[in-house]
Image: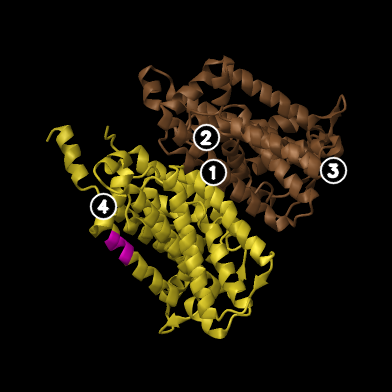
Amino acid sequence: MSRAAILARPELPSLVFLILLVAALSVTTPSFFTIPNLQAVLEQVVVVSIVALAVNQVILSEQIDISTGSLVAVCAFVYGNIALTVGGSWVPLLGALATGAFVGLVNGVLSTYGRVSSIITTMGMLFALRGAVLLAAGAQVLNLPPESRIFGLGEAFGVPISIIVLVVVFALMGVVSRHTVFGRNVYAVGGNDRAARTVGLPLNQVRLMTLVLSGLSCGLAAAVLLGQIGQLQATAATGFELKVIAAVVLGGTSITGGRGSNLAPVVGAVLVGVILNALTLNRVPGIFELFVLGVLILAAVSFDGLRTRLTDRRR
Amino acid sequence: MDVPRAADFLRSFRPSRTTGLFVLFVVEIALISAAVPGYFSVYGLLDASRQFVEAGIIALGMTLVIITGGIDLSVGSLLALVSVTIGFGMDAGLPLWLAILAGMGVGTLCGFFNGVMVTALRLHPLVVTLGTFALFRGIAFAVSGAGAVSNFPAWFGVFGQTTIGGLVPVQLVFFVVLAAAFAIMLARTRFGRYVYAIGNNEVTARFSGLDTDRAKIAIYTLTGWLVSIAAVIHTSRISSARANAGFVLELTVIAMVVLGGTRITGGSGTILGTVMGVLILSYLQDGLLFAGVRSDWGLVVVGAFLIVGVFINEFFRKETR
């Protein structure tokens, strides 16, 4: 990769910022750069990262998915109830994945062939699914047995399974995005949809598939989340959708589509995780979290805006 | 008469979208009244407006924002920030009237900030207001320390708890006046034409000599001002200022605007349509609540209405390419 290509990478600013931040924290906060703490940070961002990797594809194709918070709750509800009747982890996972994929399909069909823009479809879903899970679960609090929590608690080769799941999803998305026709089409469709239509790319099909992918990721994320917290509540993952979008955008994927990378959502999610961790380690009261997050998002997007303005002028 | 001409003939009778929405609203009220004994009364219908006036006032500004092709996710957080400013300003020793003014100032300034961020660096409004969504509520939490102020003097109730003639809630008058003003502004003034021009094609508008940045800053500032008014009414109505006020309000407001026929991609929409969207959604929720249906159904219905409403709107739209 040439030097210019590295400098043009969308996730570069956030990655540099993340590295500087980690370096600074390692010096100032002794408890930060320790294996247990870093592992804890990673485990905390797994759920957001998994969904952000898929929503990244949705945003790259010039759409958006804001139904993820409610969809994760619905999938967790399905997972929990199957786990309580059948037991184990794999059958519940299949149930959660199927639920996620189905809702993703509905989102996709409505947003493409149904001509309702994805922001409306998924916002409607956000309301409807949350209402549905509140109705179905109500005040029910489900406690999962340990054998159904392997995606959140289990370990393999001394590494938490949740982190392995994230690495696998990341690798898979990398292959899909770089080496499959679908992966390339996502960038083409988001970069210039008129050109993509002219050369005969299946616009609707590509966009539909990204939303199905996003639904699937919610199913997987639900399995990990429920495994981690062990308890199902109908209000789970409220506000999750905005965290996911923040991770994608912070990482450097452009909200207008076509420009971004696979690394961006993960870098964005880890960045948020590291900052929240640093606040906790330095005993900053939790009420400042949202404030810091807001400043961070605005700083990152302004920086990116400034950068695009400058590079555009140079051209 | 041959078939195409018959179709044209039928189409000429096609009611405007706002008329359709109005019919839908009347049918809705009739159905709820028929199904739920004791629901229909002038007093009850007017009193229900207390629940939606705040969202409705904000929806007026959101209509302008969405017509320009933008979006404002920060309105719910801003409502909380203004409310906290009023409450904690008073708690810190400001006279209440001054605290209200300070709150309105903060709200308007925050709207201005949104506008500047959107225009100065040509950032997408979704990203900017996602950031201020976290920032505004973050400040509200930091200032209030997650506590609440509720020892307001009795006269403060005038904005949210009193009625005119024992029938019309005061805030409904605010809403009607503001809605009329915004309807006139959007349909009859040069500024209103600018809003549509930006939404139809911003680049063309700019090259036609229109100061699009200034117009957009004005729109976001106006929205911030409307949020401040809504925040005063809200704080007065519940007689309490806390940082979790207006949670997920932004989504309700957007749903109302879009249901009212404003296209999310910009370029078209009316204030009257938005008012219909506000009424349809709110009375549906109110009716369900009155009938003793669990409030969670309200969420399902809002979601379904949003998708189906826009689907009907878009799917049968004639392609104008």
* Residue at 48% in and 77% down: B159
Residue occupied by mark 3? A30
Image quadrant in which you'd find residue A3: top right
- Which badge, 1 or 3, comes first in the chain's sequence? 3
Q: Is residue B184 magenta?
A: yes
Image quadrant in which you'd find residue B218: bottom left
The kind of residue tagged 1 is Met
- The answer to whether any part of residue B84 appears in the image is yes
Can you say which quadrant of the picture contains the C terminus of chain B?
A: top left
- The answer to whether marks 4 and 2 mark residues whose Cβ atoms lie closer than 8 Å is no
* Residue at 66% in and 38% down: A269
The brown-coloured chain is labelled: A
Residue B61 position, x and y percent, is 40, 58
Question: Mark on residue B193?
Answer: 4
Residue occupied by mark 1? A125
- Which badge, 1 or 2, comes first in the chain's sequence? 2
The kind of residue tagged 2 is Val
Query: Is residue A252 shown left or right of residue B195?
Result: right
What's the distance in space between the residues labelled 2 and 3, CA to CA? 49 Å
What's the distance in space between the residues labelled 1 and 2, CA to CA? 9 Å
User: What colour do you see for chain B?
Assistant: yellow
How packed mark 4 is, by other alpha carbons closer than 10 Å (few <14, some 14-19, many 20 or more), is some
How packed mark 3 is, by other alpha carbons closer than 10 Å (few <14, some 14-19, many 20 or more), is few
Query: Is residue B246 shown left or right of residue A40?
Result: left
* Location of residue B104 with respect to B298 vertically, above or below: below
Residue occupied by mark 2? A106
SS at circle 3: loop
Foreground disc of the pair 4, 3? 3
- The answer to whether marks 1 and 2 mark residues whose Cβ atoms lie closer than 8 Å is yes
